[in-house]
Amino acid sequence: MSAGQFNTIMDQGSLFALQLACQDPNGTAINLSGLGCEMQLRSLPEDANYVLELSTQNGDITILGAQGIIQITATSTQTGAISPGPYYYDVELINPNTNSVTRVVQGQIVVNAEVTR
């Protein structure tokens, strides 16, 4: 199964929230209980360094397991540290028992410049 494609906007210096619903082809929620999740934002996919990393491990991502929901949040401080412009991201689920990684979604995020500071 290939990852979904989703492009969105992030406002520099503002709270960023993204909720993903993982479903099977019949529309039934996929149970994500016990899985970890990570998201990285980079200027280019091949860049060695990321400009933002969010994860279940650091508390920026919450998984509602049986509901198949991934809730991603970046604080205004985190988004304020990102320069305006286009970036690439993906979101991956990690099974801690097998160390397998599944990319859920990928795309571009355009960071809009903050004017009021």
Image (tube, rainbow, N blue to C red):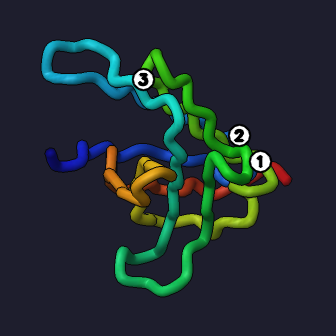
- Closest to the camera, between mark 3 and mark 1, is 3
| Relative horizontal placement of residue 65, taking residue 76 as reference (left or right) | left
Tags 3 and 2 in contact by the CB under 8 Å rule? no
User: x, y (%) of residue 5?
Assistant: 25, 46
Residue at figure coordinates x 47%, y 25% from the top left:
69
- Residue 94 visible in rendering: no
Amino acid of disc 1: Ser
Is residue 97 depicted above or below 86 in this figure? above
**SS for dot 3:** loop
User: x, y (%) of residue 45?
Assistant: 36, 75
| Relative horizontal placement of residue 49, taking residue 115 as reference (left or right) | left
Q: CA distance from mark 3 to mark 2?
A: 23 Å
Q: Which residue is mark 3?
A: 68
Q: Residue furthest bottom?
A: 48
Looking at the picture, tell me which residue is in the foreground, 79 or 67: 67
Residue at figure coordinates x 42%, y 23% from the top left:
68
Q: Which residue is mark 1?
A: 76
Badge 1 crowding class, 10 Å Cα cut-off, few under 14, some 14 to 19, many 20 or more, is some
| Residue 15's disc number | 2
Residue at figure coordinates x 47%, y 17% from the top left:
66
